[in-house]
Amino acid sequence: MRKLFQKQSINQANAISILLVALLTTFVLVFIIYNLHDEHQQEIENIEKEYIENQKELIKIETNRALKYISYKHKKDGATKPLEEIQSDIVDAIEQMRDERDGTGYIFIYTFDGVNIADPILKKNAGKNLIDIEDPNGKRVIYELIEVSKQPEGGYVEYVWNKPLINKLAPKISYAVSYKPWRWMIGAGVYLDDMYDTIKKKKFAYKNRVSKFIIGIMTLASTLFFIGMVIYHYFASTVTKDITYIEESLKNISRDYQKLDLDEIRYSEYRKTSDHINNMVEEIKEKKLALEDLNKNLEHKVEEKTYKLQSAKEFAESLVEAQDKFIKNAIHEINTPLSIIITNLDLYNMQNPKNRYLTKIEAAVKIIHNIYNDLSYAAKKDRIDHPKRLLNFSELLQERVDFFNEVALGSLITLSVDIESDIFINFNDVELQRVLDNNISNAIKYSFKEKSVTVKLYRMKKDMICFEVINFGVPIIQPDKLFERFYREHDSRGGFGIGLHIVKEICDKNGVKVKVLSSSGVTTFRYRFYL
């Protein structure tokens, strides 16, 4: 609703309000008519149901009365008269029990084989086997009546049958029971077309009633809507008048700071708003005078401040340039002695057995060498291009593992490798080495002693390579901050906090996906390289 009225004029808001009221009125009208229609439909259903139930009860009573009569005559005359004579007397008596008006309610009798015994209306059918006769819907009427009569309480069958009074087909329902000693089916039926005539009349009366009701409710709704619109228009016009006055007055305020005349405003809310506007105008006027006074000396002060800022900027730039020069010179000066130490340690190890003291020195030197490489890359990455070429990822990773093996031994840690052979990748060798060295070095640094660090390289898919480093140590608290510049989870372990930042920059540059998992003392750094 807020978006509906956002950036809308009052006239548009009024139009939308009128439309909503009209829609609501229409909805209420439709709802009332729908309920009236539903009520009528329920009434029709009740009439139909009640009529059918009454007729069913009537023919059931008539049929059971005929059944009792047959049973009575059989017991009474069974010992004194032949069976055929008894049955003839019964048929004659039953044929008199019929409704002369429309053929409804008469008693008919058939044998279980379908032979007609008694039919007061269609006497020509006497003695005929009608078990296969069907109504227009294909229902075997006599057969179904015989079958349902065999039930303990008898039953009903609905079908279409000729109505004698009008000599036309009409819906009919019959009830049938059996007199098993003689294998007779006794039944009576009633036509339902009168009920449909009654419903038709009800529907016609309903249409007339609904039409009158709709006309009445629409007249009332139109009248109320018209009255409401007149009242709404009156108040809307007075509100618009106040707003128009405030709007026109605000145009003059920007030129001559003229205040609003509160006596011209009708509504108290707008008067309060206008009073606040007048106070604001007075305050702005005072501030303007003060600002004009301040502007007289502002130009001189701006020139003075500009000169000082320029001097400070030049001084800061000179400091940054000197700092950058110092870092580059320091990195260059560190490289020579560091390379000499590593070379001599390698020569000594080739000619002499392992010395645990030299092992610790070698581990420390290699850690410093890794830090040196990070600083060197950080200082040169914006000035030197790092082109890609086809690298044997498997061999390079094995070389870096061998390089850090002495560092791991010095920290009482075992390096475990699972490197799939002959994996090639199009990457820059300097940048790839920074990713490998920082991850292996960090895993050793933050691992518990006498534990293993696992380095894995394997192909996940045809176009994807996965590099993983897994160690056992203190869980990482904030893995999402690890790659921020100068961030360190544990200050006691040393470092500058730039290694993983460099790794993240290289990965982002080359589209490598990074994921860190740390729980229950196990931390995994996973890198996905796309070919």
Image: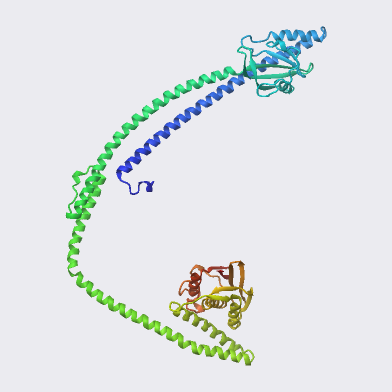
Above or below — where is 293 with respect to 93? Answer: below
What's the coloring here?
rainbow
Q: Within the image, what quadrant is residue 61 found in?
A: top right
| Residue appearing at x 37%, y 83% in the figure | 322
For the question of whether residue 223 can be seen, the reply is yes
Which of the two residues, 85 or 452, is positioned nearer the viewer here? 85
Q: Within the image, what quadrant is residue 391 found in?
A: bottom right
Q: Considering the image in quadrants, where does the C terminus appear?
A: bottom right
Report whether 217 appears left or right of 56: left
Tally of numbered tags? 0
Report whether 277 appears left or right of 224: left
Q: Position of residue 415 (x, y in %)?
A: 62, 78
Above or below — where is 89 with respect to 180? Answer: above
Q: Position of residue 244 (x, y in %)?
A: 23, 45
For the question of whether residue 522 can be seen, the reply is no
Which of the two residues, 355 or 440, is positioned nearer the viewer here? 440
Q: Position of residue 369 (x, y in %)?
A: 52, 84
Q: Position of residue 165 (x, y in %)?
A: 61, 11
Report whether 172 appears left or right of 275: right
